[in-house]
Amino acid sequence: MIDLDAARAILRSNDLGGYTVPTRGLYPFQWNWDSAIIALGWHCFDEGRAWHEARTMFDGQWDNGLLPHILFHSDSDSYFPGSEVWGANSRIPSSTVSQPPVWALAIAMMLDRSKASAAARAEVEALLPKLLAHHRWWYRDRDLGKSGLVETYHPWESGMDNSPAWDAPLARVPRVEWEYQRRDLGHVDECQRPSHGEYDRYLYLIEFLKHNHADPRRMSTSSPFRVVDLTIVSILHRATRELVSLCQQFGLDSAIPDLEVQLARTRAAMSGCWSEDHRCFLNRDKVSGTPLAERTTASLLPLFGLLASERQASQMASLIEEWLAASRFSLASTHPESPRYEPTCYWRGPVWLHINWMIADGLTAYGYDDLAREVRAQSIKCIEAAGGYFEYYGSETGEGCGGGEFSWTAAVALFWLAGE
Ligand code: GLC
């Protein structure tokens, strides 16, 4: 049984007034893609609060359109690295990278679920120029070569921090040599978190961004970590489609042709990411120019992005069927046959329910309803086994891992698992 009262209580208790922290202690600020998913959760029982979440997020948007991955609304000593390490010169202290752009999709869903009430329309009207600026930033500053595939310069931007797909590109990044104290290990067992080597490199990349003022030209030519991340590419494509539809509904027709060009470019570029051997798409390393041959859930998200052909979708559906059966709790974030699969270590194996939602949604869009239902059933099974809403779930035991009382997991229960 899914306890929706408990899910609502988690959002209320993680609400710091206009923004909702992912969980207290471990993540005490506003995170970009968490916040979009959390808004969908709020929307199920407090529409006004959902729109407020969006407004607060976009208050932190940079003038160039970047929507930061973290907004440091207040000081906290329970998290490292704080805003001073990022060194951004922004109105609201922030990081200098973004995160998978879920917002346009979340806002379109909220508008739809509000039955386009006058209040909801007014909110969308105010947010629409900001959403456009956000998407234009991705296409302009993260795809200088107009390849159709935006680039990413930090594993944290991908949202899948220590995914095994990043092992090889990250290994190229030097380690910082200064001393620092990790705060995450005060909240969560070390074996469920990234390694020290990874943290040293995450920090190096933050310093690299700072040193280069996050300048797109410099980043795209000299960042030691430069990848095409399919989570971002897929979500951006799906969200841009929603943005086009919002522009149609709100009379912003002049913005549409540019967006259509971007959509077409991405669709055309996707065949270069397909791997017949792996039966899915693969992230790419832009430094070496090679595919990253690791099957992670990012490889499946082009279904959510509506970027797969019917034939590719059918190959992926058969892969997903095997993937579901390969661990006791599913979908494991890394395919269980990978030598790098670790069932309780963060993005190297555990089940993440917002990703399950996206994959199930993609499966439904391509007509694989039974498989989508199975992914949904697996998600409920995790919450039941662990007895609550955790950051992620062990893919062999279903145990709750990472942070507890976790906002996006509670939100997913409200807007997805409670339905039907
Ligand atoms: C971790 C996750 C990232 C998430 C953040 C806050 O860094 O990898 O995806 O946004 O925590 O929940």
Image (tube, rainbow, N blue to C red):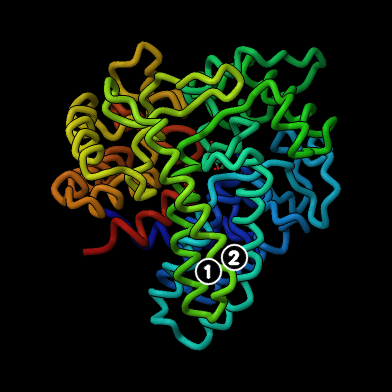
List x then y, in percent, for residue 318: 17, 33
Which amino acid type is shown beneath numbered disc 2? Ala
- Number of the front mark, 2 or 1: 2
| Pointer 2 residue Cβ closer than 8 Å to ligand 1 | no
- Residue 156 in view (yes/no): yes
Residue depicted at x 50% and y 54%: 102
List x then y, in percent, for residue 135: 60, 56
267 or 246: nearer the viewer: 267
Residue depicted at x 37% and y 42%: 302
Which amino acid type is shown beneath numbered disc 1? Ala
Where on the image, by quarter, is ligand 1? top right
Crowding near the residue tagged with mark 1, few <14, some 14–19, many ≥20 C-alpha atoms within 10 Å: many
Q: Quadrant of residue 43?
A: bottom left
Residue depicted at x 34% and y 49%: 357
The answer to the question of whether label 2 and label 1 lie on touching residues, with beta carbons closer than 8 A, is yes
| 232 vs 297: above or below | below
Could you tell me which secondary element the residue under label 2 belongs to?
Answer: helix
- Residue 393 in view (yes/no): no
Q: Residue 54 has which mark?
A: 2
| 116 vs 219: above or below | below
Quick check: 93 left or right of 307? Answer: right
| 240 vs 329: above or below | below
The span from disc 2 to disc 1 (Cα, nearest Å) is: 7 Å
List x then y, in percent, for residue 232: 51, 42
Could you tell me which secondary element the residue under label 1 belongs to?
Answer: helix
Quick check: 63 left or right of 119? Answer: right
Residue depicted at x 66% and y 40%: 144
**Which quadrant holds the C terminus?**
bottom left
Q: Which residue is mark 1?
A: 50
List x then y, in percent, for residue 112: 39, 74
127 or 312: nearer the viewer: 312
